[in-house]
C-alpha cells in the first residue's frame, strides 16, 4: 500500500537526518549567527517629580536633628565668636577712619596756616632794618663805609698822637685828637690814615674815641673819653702789642701801645701831649 511506504520513507529519512546531525555534532561545534550592528538604545527622558514630591530645602536647613546636643552648642559658640570678630573688625575700621580724618584735618589746617603765613609775608610791610639807609648815610664819594660811629662817640680833650716808625726811621707824626674817629686802610678816598701796604685791606681798622665809665684813683666813678681800636674784618688782621685782635670788637688803647696792620713792618706808637719825651708846642 502506498501510504505505508510514505510513512516508512519519512521515518527512514528522519532517522537518517538524525544520524547525520549526530555525526556532524560530534565532528564540529555549531556556528553562531552573525550579529548585525544596531544603534545604542535611547535613554528614556525622566520627567521631574511634581513639586509636591520635592523636599523643602528650608525645612531641611532648619531641622535641629543634625546639630543636636553638643554639636548645637559648638555651632552657637562658633557663631558667637564669628560675630565678635566681625564687630572687632568694624570697630577697627571705624577707628582707622577716624584717625585718617584727623590726619586729613590736621594737614588742611597746616596748609591753611602756611598759606596765611605766606600771605602775611607777602602783604604785611617789614619794618626791620635792611641796612640800605645806613649804606646811603655811610656812603662817601661813591664808596660805602663799613663802619658807623656809635652813640657814645666823642671828640677827646686829650691831644692823642700816633708816631709811625718804620725800622729805625721815625715818620711824620699823626694828630688824632681833632675828630671822634679815624678810619685806616688803603682806600684813600674815604680813609683818614692811609695804609698802603698790599697786605692791608681797603678799610682795615678804625680808632674810635668813646665816652665810657671811668673809675678814679679814689674809687669814685666818672665819665671819660678813651681811645679804642677795632678791626673791620680785614683779611690779614690787626695787632695790638704784637697780639692779633678779634674783628668787630673794641679794644681799649693806652699810652705807649704799639699798633700794626697786616704784614706791614710799620708800627704806630700811641702817645699824648703829657707823655714823656713829647715836645711842647706840637698841636
Image: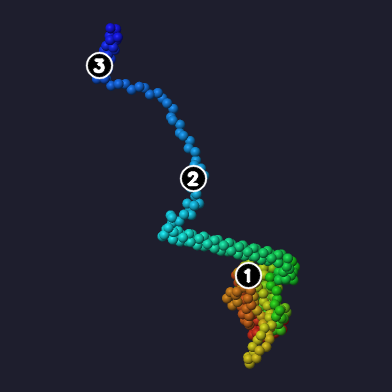
Check the image and report above or below for 176 versus 74: below
How far across and how far down the image is residue 127, in percent?
72, 71
Q: How far is mark 3 from mark 2, CA to CA? A: 66 Å
Quick one: label 2 or label 1, which is nearer the N terminus? 2
Camera-side residue of 168 and 209: 209
Question: Quadrant of the image for the N terminus?
Answer: top left
Q: Which mark is residue 75?
A: none
Specify the quadrant of the image occupied by residue 149.
bottom right
Q: Residues within 10 Å of mark 1 (few under 14, many from 20)?
A: some
Q: Which residue is denoted by mark 3 in the rendering?
A: 19
Residue at horizontal 26 percent and vertical 15 percent from the top: 15
How far across and how far down the image is residue 110, in percent?
64, 65
171 vs 42, left or right, is right
How far across and how far down the image is residue 156, in percent?
71, 82
Q: Which residue is denoted by mark 2 in the rendering?
A: 53
Specify the quadrant of the image occupied by residue 8.
top left
Quick one: label 3 or label 1, which is nearer the N terminus? 3
Q: Which residue is denoted by mark 1 in the rendering?
A: 234
Quick one: label 3 or label 2, which is nearer the N terminus? 3
How far across and how far down the image is residue 276, in percent?
64, 85
Amino acid at each position: 500500500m502506498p501510504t505505508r511506504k510514505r510513512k516508512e520513507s519519512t521515518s527512514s529519512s528522519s532517522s537518517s537526518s538524525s544520524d547525520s546531525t549526530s555525526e556532524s555534532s560530534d565532528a564540529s561545534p555549531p556556528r553562531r549567527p552573525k550579529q548585525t550592528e544596531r544603534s545604542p538604545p535611547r535613554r528614556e527622558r525622566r520627567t521631574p517629580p511634581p513639586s509636591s514630591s520635592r523636599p523643602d530645602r528650608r525645612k531641611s536647613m532648619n531641622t535641629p536633628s543634625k546639630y543636636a546636643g553638643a554639636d548645637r552648642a559648638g555651632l552657637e559658640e562658633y557663631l558667637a565668636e564669628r560675630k565678635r570678630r566681625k564687630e572687632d573688625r568694624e570697630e577697627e575700621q571705624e577707628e582707622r577712619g577716624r584717625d585718617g580724618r584727623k590726619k586729613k584735618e590736621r594737614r588742611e589746617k597746616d596748609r591753611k596756616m602756611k598759606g596765611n603765613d605766606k600771605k602775611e609775608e607777602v602783604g604785611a610791610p617789614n619794618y626791620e632794618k635792611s641796612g640800605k639807609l645806613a649804606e646811603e648815610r655811610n656812603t662817601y664819594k661813591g664808596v660805602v663805609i663799613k663802619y658807623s660811629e656809635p652813640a657814645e662817640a666823642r671828640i677827646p680833650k686829650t691831644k692823642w698822637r700816633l708816631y709811625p716808625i718804620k725800622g729805625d726811621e721815625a715818620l711824620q707824626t699823626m694828630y688824632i685828637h681833632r675828630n671822634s674817629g679815624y678810619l685806616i686802610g688803603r682806600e684813600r678816598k674815604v680813609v683818614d690814615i692811609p695804609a698802603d701796604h698790599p697786605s692791608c685791606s681797603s678799610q682795615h681798622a678804625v680808632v674810635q674815641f668813646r665816652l665810657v665809665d671811668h673809675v678814679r684813683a679814689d674809687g669814685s666813678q666818672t665819665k671819660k673819653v678813651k681811645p679804642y681800636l677795632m678791626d673791620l674784618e680785614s683779611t690779614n688782621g690787626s695787632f695790638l702789642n704784637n697780639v692779633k685782635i678779634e674783628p668787630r670788637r673794641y679794644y681799649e688803647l693806652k699810652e705807649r701801645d704799639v699798633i700794626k696792620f697786616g704784614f706791614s713792618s710799620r708800627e704806630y706808637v700811641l702817645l699824648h701831649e703829657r707823655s714823656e719825651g713829647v715836645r711842647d708846642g706840637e698841636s
